[in-house]
Amino acid sequence: MLRRGLTEGWRGRKRWRLRELVEEVGDRLFLQGHDEEGAPALTTLRDFMRESPDRVGEAQIFDPAFEEDCPELLLDFDVPPDFAGRNDLFHLLGPQRPDFRWFLVGRAGQQTPWHVDPLGTSAWHALMEGEKRWRVLEPKDLHAWQERVFEAKEMSSRRLVDEAKQQGHGWIEILQRPGDVVVIPSSYPHEVTNLQDSVAITQNFVNESNLVYAYRFLKRACPDKAARFQELLQQHMPDLSTLIQERGFRDSSMVTAGGKRQERENSHLKEYT
């Protein structure tokens, strides 16, 4: 799950230090969660970093549309080849693609609670500055544990890990440092804590291993996009279109079982890594 060497040569390794970022884009607005009514809560990077860590609140900067106000940031990183092309199938949707890439800034002590990534996607997460601790569960039954993970947002991390260990599930703790990339497979529950003020880029992806699972969730959440995605697969990768048709009905019971749980995770799409 921890990959090194993937960020060598990225401009962001030098440019995405907080001091430099505040100087360059400190007065531009970024998404910092949502208010009680669900409306976007915006902040400038300068204001976010000006607050002391104990007063900044729980919400980190977690922005899926940062390129609208800061297009130059897109020049500072490259999608690693292992997560591009045929390993990033939703790219076929172009501008219709659901939110998939986020710019993150978190203060020391801020935490992303236990969750699974939306729409059955996997994710890669590259850290530019700071230090993060990841806890990742490897349940024997991934989809059955999604409900437990949703409930775990109201319980302590240690209690959840202890419960998983008692039931024979595996878990991993990862210490991520600048330049490291953490890769989270589809449906693996995880929790992330900023041990230091941190800056990162993360992107969700779909490849052949989770294609059928992710497609079924896309079909439930965005039927029009799912239909368009199927058309594009048929045009560009007919073998994978056939895979969906052959396995889709066979796997439908699995998705139905996890669908309501995942839908609740999807409703918090903009809050989680």
Image (cartoon, helix red, strand yellow):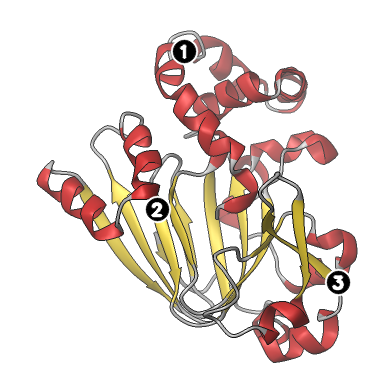
Note whether 162 is above or below 193 in the view shown. above
Q: Residue at x 83, y 61 (%)?
A: 67
Q: Earlier in the sequence, mark 1 or mark 2?
A: 2
In the rendered view of the protein, which quadrant contains the C terminus?
Answer: bottom right
- Residue 267: horizontal and vertical position, in percent? 60, 37
Q: Residue at x 26, y 41 (%)?
A: 139
- Residue 80: horizontal and vertical position, in percent? 61, 60
Q: Residues within 10 Å of mark 1 (few under 14, many from 20)?
A: some
Disc 3 and disc 1: Cα gap in Å? 42 Å
Which residue is the extreme one toward the front?
36
Relative horizontal placement of residue 50, taking residue 258 as reference (left or right)? right
Q: Which residue is mark 3?
A: 72
Disc 2 and disc 3: Cα gap in Å? 30 Å
| Residue in the foreground of this view, choosing between 101 and 6 | 101
Q: Secondary structure at mark 3?
A: helix
- Numbered badge on residue 252: 1
- Residue 160: horizontal and vertical position, in percent? 25, 51
Q: Residues within 10 Å of mark 3 (few under 14, many from 20)?
A: few
Q: Secondary structure at mark 2?
A: strand
Q: Which residue is mark 2?
A: 190
